[in-house]
Amino acid sequence: MSRIDGRTPEQLRPVTIQRGWSKHAEGSVLISFGDTKVFCTASVTEGVPRWRKGSGEGWVTAEYSMLPRATNTRGDRESVRGKIGGRTHEISRLIGRSLRAVIDYKALGENTIVLDCDVLQADGGTRTAAITGAYVALADAVAWAQQKKLVRAGRKPLTGTVAAVSVGIVDGVPLLDLCYEEDVRADTDMNVVCTGDGRFVEVQGTAEAEPFDRKELNALLDLATVGCTDLGTLQLEALGRTEPTN
Amino acid sequence: MSRIDGRTPEQLRPVTIQRGWSKHAEGSVLISFGDTKVFCTASVTEGVPRWRKGSGEGWVTAEYSMLPRATNTRGDRESVRGKIGGRTHEISRLIGRSLRAVIDYKALGENTIVLDCDVLQADGGTRTAAITGAYVALADAVAWAQQKKLVRAGRKPLTGTVAAVSVGIVDGVPLLDLCYEEDVRADTDMNVVCTGDGRFVEVQGTAEAEPFDRKELNALLDLATVGCTDLGTLQLEALGRTEPTN
Amino acid sequence: MSRIDGRTPEQLRPVTIQRGWSKHAEGSVLISFGDTKVFCTASVTEGVPRWRKGSGEGWVTAEYSMLPRATNTRGDRESVRGKIGGRTHEISRLIGRSLRAVIDYKALGENTIVLDCDVLQADGGTRTAAITGAYVALADAVAWAQQKKLVRAGRKPLTGTVAAVSVGIVDGVPLLDLCYEEDVRADTDMNVVCTGDGRFVEVQGTAEAEPFDRKELNALLDLATVGCTDLGTLQLEALGRTEPTN
Amino acid sequence: MSRIDGRTPEQLRPVTIQRGWSKHAEGSVLISFGDTKVFCTASVTEGVPRWRKGSGEGWVTAEYSMLPRATNTRGDRESVRGKIGGRTHEISRLIGRSLRAVIDYKALGENTIVLDCDVLQADGGTRTAAITGAYVALADAVAWAQQKKLVRAGRKPLTGTVAAVSVGIVDGVPLLDLCYEEDVRADTDMNVVCTGDGRFVEVQGTAEAEPFDRKELNALLDLATVGCTDLGTLQLEALGRTEPTN
Amino acid sequence: MSRIDGRTPEQLRPVTIQRGWSKHAEGSVLISFGDTKVFCTASVTEGVPRWRKGSGEGWVTAEYSMLPRATNTRGDRESVRGKIGGRTHEISRLIGRSLRAVIDYKALGENTIVLDCDVLQADGGTRTAAITGAYVALADAVAWAQQKKLVRAGRKPLTGTVAAVSVGIVDGVPLLDLCYEEDVRADTDMNVVCTGDGRFVEVQGTAEAEPFDRKELNALLDLATVGCTDLGTLQLEALGRTEPTN
Amino acid sequence: MSRIDGRTPEQLRPVTIQRGWSKHAEGSVLISFGDTKVFCTASVTEGVPRWRKGSGEGWVTAEYSMLPRATNTRGDRESVRGKIGGRTHEISRLIGRSLRAVIDYKALGENTIVLDCDVLQADGGTRTAAITGAYVALADAVAWAQQKKLVRAGRKPLTGTVAAVSVGIVDGVPLLDLCYEEDVRADTDMNVVCTGDGRFVEVQGTAEAEPFDRKELNALLDLATVGCTDLGTLQLEALGRTEPTN
């Protein structure tokens, strides 16, 4: 059985990672997972939120948003509606947690990095593309902070790579990196965030129709682990590095 | 090693489920998981949201909230701040999805059931207690709707039981049903929602400090499956039933 | 003529006052006036709002809210609507003013006590039950503050008891402590807040249909005074005290 | 003892009522109680809010607001803050209830009248001036609706006059119609709304410092009744009428 | 051809400027351009917004609003809707910029002046009347600040007069100071803000139907320049001055 | 004198217009004016807003926004702050008015086109780039609607081209198309919107420091007219057309 776009079940969509897409941001990436395009910027500021002052530790946070016409039908702007929806909140928090998993707060020192992930075009997997791209922007921002001596010499704020991918069961078959059309038809939908060494940062699986059993869960986790490892390789290539920490 | 409150790693806290706690709601439950107390009501109304009208199918949704002094330190009311926080949004959505997993929309017909889960006292696991209690309130509300003939004779809107429990790794040991103090110290925190037959509805695991490996994940899933099965038995006992569907 | 629930016109509904209903709050009470149940917590924090800093005086304030299904028909959550309604504002302010009437700010010192009154079930008289219950929670919180030495030795922040009751004219007969069904049918509706010595803190009377004359007003004030005195006795009993100040 | 502005305790401030202050509104009045100036407009629209449609009955509602510099110190605009404060809500509701007390909904038919009361300058008693002025604007709006045949021939939507005045106890002396300086110093503050025949529509008394006893309450009610009667006479004079109904 | 109200094309509506309309504000003016009436107050406070502290320079800002029934049909209050509309924002910013054009921040010192322009009755040209009136209120507020020694002796914070007027092309004829009926019918609508010496502070022209050519633009600018000069003369007359600076 | 980036005073920055940048939108353009990059999408929906239903006429509106890190320093998201700022409102309205100037509503029929202009990178002139790019997206959307028969055969909803450019006086020299650094230093700042035939749709000039005289105004208008004509040529080239209407 081949997929809508001809891929095999365990194949990622074509991934492109363009760095330096913004002249202002300390790190910036335009990432695409097939037709899903997310613009990720990393903004560094000295200092930390009030509740963390004096701790000697830094902070990393994220905000996710979709442009109104990123999707097939135009959605309302959350700024115009005057409030952020639950889905946006949820994904912003997920991205922030995922990236903080590879940050050594002490090494970062009292600096804050904000990741903005704005979806320019959506075709499934926007949150996983956002995490994967944001990591690259974050790595550039950390390097910038090191160069500007905001981070003390010898300190390595990044402890590894982190990437994310979606997996799901469509017509009984576990698939990697669902496009929108597959996502809509999936019985089970799971987003997995892994570090480059194959360990889990986040596992979020949801039964859309039927509950899933342990065997299905295992098959999905197997697929996701391989997908994240592949993405980790692409991230390092984009950064021109051979090892994740800096 | 014994736990803070003397439990074994695979032991639930004492669970109590009191039905009929509201004279107004079609279903109502005061559930406690140890010192965590959640008041769950199920409200039935004829009709469905606009986007579902004419489908012949029903709808189930949920809202979660904490009273300001449910926690050790008083928090601001979200109504006073004028917006709902990301955590509240996320949990409300989780509860709704979890309960919809055991609903046959067609059998329910064009009726809406809203679950309100208000945390009166928090000591860890408020979302899992909410899901577990809300199921019982939902079952009573469905029975009410059947009796009032809002649901057609012979139809069984409930397809099974659903319960939830938290698991986590504290000091290297996988533990079931974390209390607040354990939750704060956990390296990995996972909430698992299962149906009574041991299949998964939601799996949400987060590495708080270190990423977790596949072996740890498996140990947590094992614990959670047993915990949910036990909760399913308690739910049926509370309902005075021997089989989940009605 | 006897009332819907068999009471005489000058009879209160059964009142229960359970202290210590929360393990976190410095004072907490579950109060019921018949089927009206309000959960009141008192939270003590050191310090006062900015406008009062350096005055040497404390502050007491209150927030009132109804759970969405406290009433016969489910109401929207104010947090979800994103703003607090006029009725909620009005009652929160009333509770705060009522309790401040028995507080000696200087004796309290620069501490703040917030009373949260959440209606779990409504059957008329929610604001009067809230005031009456909040007083008991406040008394416990003040005692806690004294014990923790937040209040200076020998100081008595509480200057007396305060309780509240509703009165109204139904079918020409003045009645004490209206339940919901009576409240709906009342021509005139009045909420009266009194100190234990029978003096008035608040008098709020509203003609629902016909304006009321001075004679009717007098009859209602007579009833309310007696009702508040009875409630004051119940408050002291609940607190296990013989005199109001502490 | 004479008052700050030389009045006797039972004397109103100079009251002026100018009708026709807006070329657009169906009724409009600039009322002053001494230095308190409120601009009241009455807007008539055919139809009623959704919840009242088909009832054959009309509706009257009110909105109160203060210009930011109506007071001695500039206050924030509620539109800029993005929400209405509790005090504004409370007064808007009071004005609406007060005017509805003299409206025969059936005679009004399915028409809505909105009273806008905007305080241009505040010197105490803004809500009582607002009610008193809004009545006159309402009377003009009702007359307009009768003339335009929105109200059926022979129907008299207005059932009487309604006016309001503040009273309070300052240095032990009950005073009528407090100016701001007196209001600040008052131990007890009461707003009373009466119909022209001396019956009560609203009684709202608050102990600012010491609770008040029944004797003091009686003295205040006596003063207020006389004050409202005097205001009723001034309202009819302004309208050029000898009897309140139309 | 004569205009709706009999004016010639280059004639202003009758303009009245009443100073001292508020007992509280440091400067206050009721200005009318025909039937358009705007109440302008200027509030002086010591200190400046945070971003300007320590600069030695002052700040001037403005807020514009319409009473709900200033127009022919009642509009919703922005405070009730919970947000300010684009038009209100735009005009508030325009008024602020216009007045800042004649302020020497250094001479003003670290003081803030807020201009509130509330439209009591609208008949076209509310923003231009607001600017013209606000200038007079500002001049009075500056004089007050000088007298109270908030401004250092010898300093002249006002550098000139500023006034505004609308112009437009109706049926091919350029007209000065449009009333509402003309404004609705205009093909091109322009608001021009000038200093007393005929220079431009703001030029905002909009083609309502057809784009306008350079010749039409020139004709409108000619008219506006004359109108603003006339208004400058009226402003000085109202202030009882012969020269703009103080 | 040459400019910061070596341009002559009357020279535009390099302009690029890439069509088809979104797979979902009916029209989409990535436009750059030097380092200013704006992503413009045009979304077509059948039907019009309620107030226009049954008119047989269409509607065109626009929303402008900046990504948080489009600028040198990260700005707060308006969705997170919960309200749209005055500047955003003002620019959204300007874009909408500008594009409506070249639309024949009757020819468009009861269809709505929404232009979303999201600034990805800002370096001055974001609103003028947005208008210029949105026109091209609009033209593509209109062509799509014609092809899909939403627009009746033979109807030409577009009546011409529209483009916008900024002009300003820096160090006494009138300059075309200011970059950010020039904009900050400009004494006078003007945005001009013209149709392809050199007529004005909007003229918005603001004195930043000193008021400007008529001669300066004329010089700016001369520059802007030429700039807009050049942009009109580039728009037609991008669309591959020789005449603006379609």
Image: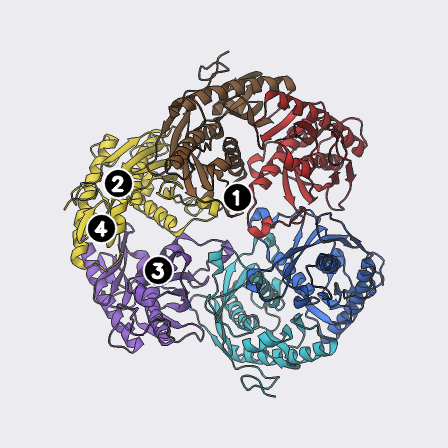
Chain colours: A purple, B yellow, C brown, D red, E blue, F cyan
For discs 3 and 2, the disc positioned in front in the rendered view:
3
Chain for mark 4? B
Vertical order, C61 against A142 (above or below): above
User: How far is mark 3 from mark 4, CA to CA?
Assistant: 27 Å
User: How far is mark 1 from mark 3, CA to CA?
Assistant: 32 Å
Q: Nearer the viewer, residue F107 or E84?
A: E84
User: How far is mark 1 from mark 2, CA to CA?
Assistant: 63 Å
Residue F163's label in the rendered image is none
Q: Is residue F114 left or right of residue C66?
A: right
Residue topped by disc 1: C55
Which quadrant, please, contains the N terminus of chain D? top right
Residue A55's label in the rendered image is 3
Which quadrant, please, contains the C terminus of chain D? top right
Residue topped by disc 4: B168
Identify which amino acid the numbered label 2 is placed on: Thr
Chain for mark 3? A
Identify which amino acid the numbered label 4 is placed on: Gly
Residue topped by disc 2: B159
Do the CB atoms of the residues marked 1 and 3 lie less than 8 Å apart?
no
Label 3 environment density (alpha carbons within 10 Å; few <14, some 14–19, many ≥20):
few
Label 1 environment density (alpha carbons within 10 Å; few <14, some 14–19, many ≥20):
few
